[in-house]
Structures are given as C-alpha cells and as structure tokens.
Image (cartoon, helix red, strand yellow):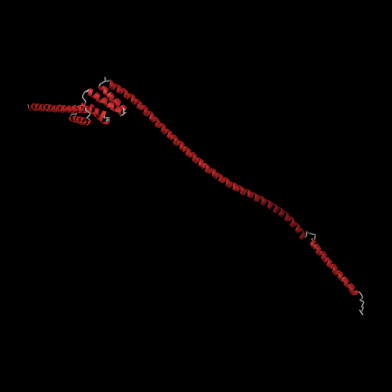
Amino acid sequence: MKKYILLIVFLFGYFGISQDEEKEKAKALEASKNYTWNANKNLSEDKFVDAEAEYRKAISKSSENAAAPYNLGNAYYKKETYSEAFGRFKQAGEVATSKADKHKAYHNMGNVFMKRKEYEKAVEAYKEALRNNPKDEETRYNLALAKEMLKKQQDEQKNDQNKDQDKDQDKKDQDKKDKEDKNKDKKDGDEGDKGDKDKEEEKKDGDKGDKGDQGEEEKEDNKEGEGDEKKEDKKQPNQGDQQQEKSQPRPNQLSKQQVQNLLEAMQNEEKKVKDKIDAKKVKGAKVKNEKDW
C-alpha cells in the first residue's frame, strides 16, 4: 500500500514539475519573440546596432526561437559580415524544429559559402536545404550554379597546379642547364689551363728542343772538332811514326844524324890522318935558314 502511495506522489510531483518547466519555456519563448519583433522593427528603421542588441536578447532568452538567429544572420549578411552571418544561420538550422525553418537556414548558409567562393561547401548546404524542401526552385538553381562554379574552380586549380608543375619542371630544367653550363665552363677552364700547361710544356719542350738543337750543334761542332782532332790524332800517330822513323833507326839502317855524325867522325879522322901526314912531311923536310940581313 505504501509503495502505491509513493508512486502516486512521485508521478504527481514529476508531472507537476514538468508543467512548471513547460510554462517557463513558453514564457521565455514569448519574451524572445517580443525581442525579435523589436529587433525587426529597429532593423527596418536602419537601426542596426539597436536591432543587433534586441536579437541577442531574444537568442539568450530562448534557445527555441529559430527566427532570432536567422534574422540576425540576414542582418549580418546584408552588412557583408559573412562569418557572423554563417554562425547565426548555422545556429538557426540547429534549433529549428520545422523543415521550412531548416530549409531557409541551410539555403542561406549556401549563399554565404557562395560569397566566400567555397563552392564545395555551398553544394552540400544547398543539398541539405533541398532535403527539407525539394520543391524550392531558387535553391535548386543555386545548387546548379554552385556545381558549375565548383567545376570551374577545380579546372582552374588543376590548370594552376599544372602551371606550377611546369614552372617547377622549367626551374629544374634551368637548374640542370645552369649546372651543365657551369660544369662545361669549368671543363673548358680546366682544358684551357691544361692547354696553357700544354703550351708551357711545349714551350719547355721547345726550349729543350732549342737547347737540344744547340746541343746537337755543339755535338756536331764537337763531332767536327772531334773529327778534326781524330784526324789530327790519326794523323799525328803517323807523323809520330815518321818522327820515330827519323829519330829511331830501324834494324840494319842508320839514321840521317847517325850518318852525319859518322861522316863528321870520318872527316875528323881523315883530318887527323892528314894532319899527321902533313906533320911528318914538315918534320922530314930540310929547313933553309935565310938571314934577313
């Protein structure tokens, strides 16, 4: 029995609290709508700051009022404050309970993406809007336009990418060409240095050649001199032999000097003999003394 009593008390309290909450929510929603009305009025009178303040009060008063963020989003959109506008349209789409409100929120989100040239996101937003209202021709037209702009954008990006790739390839080709030219210049320089070195070597070889020629001439001169000397040397031994023949008697043959000496010796002997004979003649002859008086 007690259990049933407790259950009845609990259910009564739960439904009582729920009814109070529902009343509070309804009251807050009504106040939010009043703020929204005031904001719309200010906005129509070009009082944007006052309208913005009233919309904010409406949004803070009740999260179930989709009209307040949606209208504030439109106000930002007209001011070309697209980031703020998108945030309010998104908020309106999240709190909206009817498909009509969701359709309007996503349609306007697509418009923001179109302004920001985010065509891929615009396509998705328009698609979501059509899911909530497939009969809206304006949304369908915007979707077709977004798809066309997306294709054009992708083609341009592809072309830009190809251009970038071409530029990169051109840069690589130019770098390669510069490197080849640099290597060629270096090679030419090395060959030039080598050529200069070869010239120096040739010059050295030329000097050596000249020196060699001079040496050859000297050798020729020396050869000629040596030839003369050899001729002289060759001649001198013969003369030496002749001198030896003159100075040294051959066996059984007297030299001229020896012959001359021998002749002089013979003449001396003959003279001595003659002197002796003459002396004997003088000695044996009679002397006739004559007086000088």
Residue occupying image coordinates x 58% and y 46%: 203
Quadrant of residue 62 in the image?
A: top left
Task: Say if residue 94 shows up in the picture.
Answer: no
Q: Is residue 286 above or below residue 263?
A: below
Question: What percent of the width, then of the height, locates residue 23?
Answer: 13, 27
Please state which of residues 203 and 267 is positioned toward the viewer in this rendering: 203
Q: Does any portion of residue 221 appear in the rendered image?
A: yes
What is the quadrant of residue 260 in the picture?
bottom right
- Specify the quadrant that holds the N terminus: top left
Percent position of residue 85, x then y: 25, 29
Drawn side of residue 52 relative to residue 257, left or right: left
Q: How many labels, in total?
A: 0
Q: Is residue 75 above or below residue 196?
A: above
Residue farthest bottom in this picture: 293
Q: Residue at x 35, y 26 (%)?
A: 152
Along the viewing direction, whichever of 267 and 153 lies nearer the viewer: 153
Q: Position of residue 210 (x, y in %)?
A: 61, 48
Q: Residue furthest front?
A: 45
Task: From the viewer's perspective, tell me whether residue 59 is left or right of residue 13.
Answer: right
**Front residue of 31 and 126:** 31
Residue 99, percent across and down?
A: 23, 22
